[in-house]
Amino acid sequence: MEKEKITLARWYTPEEATQVLNTLLAKQDITLADWYNAEEAAQVLNTSTKYVRQVGVKYGKFTTYKLNMHTMLYLKRDVDIYQINKGQPGRPRKDEQAA
């Protein structure tokens, strides 16, 4: 396994990051049981795959592994503990305001 393919979540402390990276590298291969693809992660988080990709790559909240050019895996441990905070609901439509 190449180190370049694994991107650790940014919220790990340096000690945790070292431990996670050493564990992954010690295996020398990816055990798919430890990872979600974008669709599975989206189901767990009850959101879209686009949101999962953005949180994982752009914001670095999940440890990711680029399996190939079109497939990114997300570490189950990171996805399972991630919480989505629902914001304020949008404005009601004009139809609802009139009622």
Image: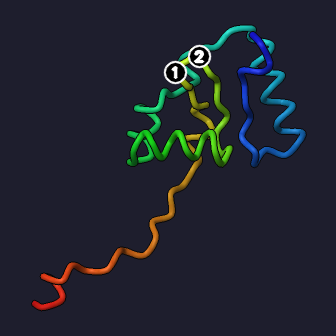
Q: CA distance from mark 2 to mark 1?
A: 5 Å
Q: Which amino acid lies under the numbered mark 1 shown in the image of this protein?
A: Thr
Quarter of the N terminus within the rendering: top right
Judged left or right of residue 77, residue 24 is: right
Residue 40 shows which numbered tag? none
Q: Along the line of sight, which residue is nearer the eye, 95 or 33?
A: 95
Q: Name the residue located 87 percent from the left edge and 31 percent from the top edge.
A: 18
Q: Is residue 30 above or below residue 73?
A: above
Q: Name the residue located 78 percent from the left edge and 29 percent from the top edge.
A: 20
The reply to whether dot 2 and dot 1 touch (C-beta < 8 Å) is: yes
Judged left or right of residue 27, residue 73 is: left
Q: Which amino acid lies under the numbered mark 2 shown in the image of this protein?
A: Leu
Q: Position of residue 31 (x, y in %)?
A: 60, 14
Q: Which residue is mark 1?
A: 71
Q: Circle 2: is it few (<14), some (14-19), or many (20+) Cα within 10 Å? A: few
Give the quarter of the image for residue 7: top right
Q: Along the line of sight, which residue is nearer the eye, 4 or 78?
A: 4
For mark 2, give the secondary structure: strand
Quarter of the C terminus within the rendering: bottom left
Q: Circle 1: is it few (<14), some (14-19), or many (20+) Cα within 10 Å? A: few
Q: Name the residue located 75 percent from the left edge and 45 percent from the top edge.
A: 10
Q: Which residue is mark 2?
A: 67
How many numbered marks have been drawn onto this rendered protein structure?
A: 2
